[in-house]
């Protein structure tokens, strides 16, 4: 009987840890997405020659992710087994990531070139 209670308690602790990890990953994902979107919109609104550097973390608290910029939107997918994702709209219609694709783990420069925001690896 004691073994059954012990197994139940261990299982409950493992489930709580997994839930806490999932909540932290979601919070980190939303925070990263919002922070980058603010920077991207600021470069666009700053006009020609406005620029800023941005560093993407390698992981979101130990959880792998991918980060892709599209015209008028940004997509962050994390925990690939679950395909959890967040996306947001941006003001930037003309964006060129120079074929970088997934930006996770990169240091990039966002630069406004006549209304087009270029994203290049630094």
Image (cartoon, rainbow, N blue to C red):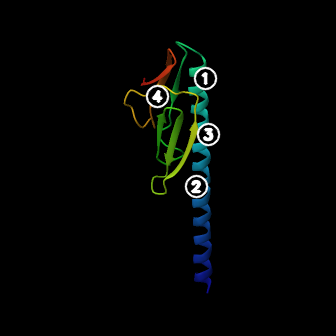
Which residue is identified by label 1? 42
Give yes or no for contact between labels 4 and 1 (Cβ–Cβ under 8 Å).
no
Placement of 118 over or under 64, stated as above or below = above
Q: Earlier in the sequence, mark 3 or mark 2?
A: 2
Which residue is identified by label 2? 22
Image coords of residue 28 (percent x, y): 59, 44
Q: Residues within 10 Å of mark 2 (few under 14, many from 20)?
A: some
Which residue is identified by label 4? 107
Q: Earlier in the sequence, mark 1 or mark 2?
A: 2
- Residue name at image x 52 percent, y 12 percent: 49
**Residue farthest to the front?**
93
- Residue name at image x 48 percent, y 34 percent: 69
Callout 3 secondary element: helix
Q: 8 or 42, which lies in front?
A: 42
Q: Residues within 10 Å of mark 3 (few under 14, many from 20)?
A: few
Give yes or no for contact between labels 3 and 1 (Cβ–Cβ under 8 Å).
no
Image coords of residue 70 (percent x, y): 48, 34
Callout 4 secondary element: strand
């Amino acid at each position: 009987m004691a073994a059954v209670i012990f197994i139940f308690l261990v299982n409950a602790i493992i489930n709580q840890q997994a839930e806490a990890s999932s909540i932290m990953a979601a919070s980190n994902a939303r925070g990263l997405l919002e922070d980058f979107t603010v920077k991207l919109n600021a470069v666009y609104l700053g006009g020609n020659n406005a620029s800023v550097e941005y560093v993407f973390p390698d992981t979101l608290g130990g959880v792998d992710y991918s980060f892709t910029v599209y015209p008028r939107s940004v997509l962050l997918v994390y925990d690939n087994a679950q395909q959890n994702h967040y996306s947001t709209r941006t003001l930037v219609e003309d964006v060129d990531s120079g074929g970088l694709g997934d930006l996770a783990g990169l240091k990039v420069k966002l630069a406004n070139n006549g209304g087009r925001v270029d994203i290049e690896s630094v």
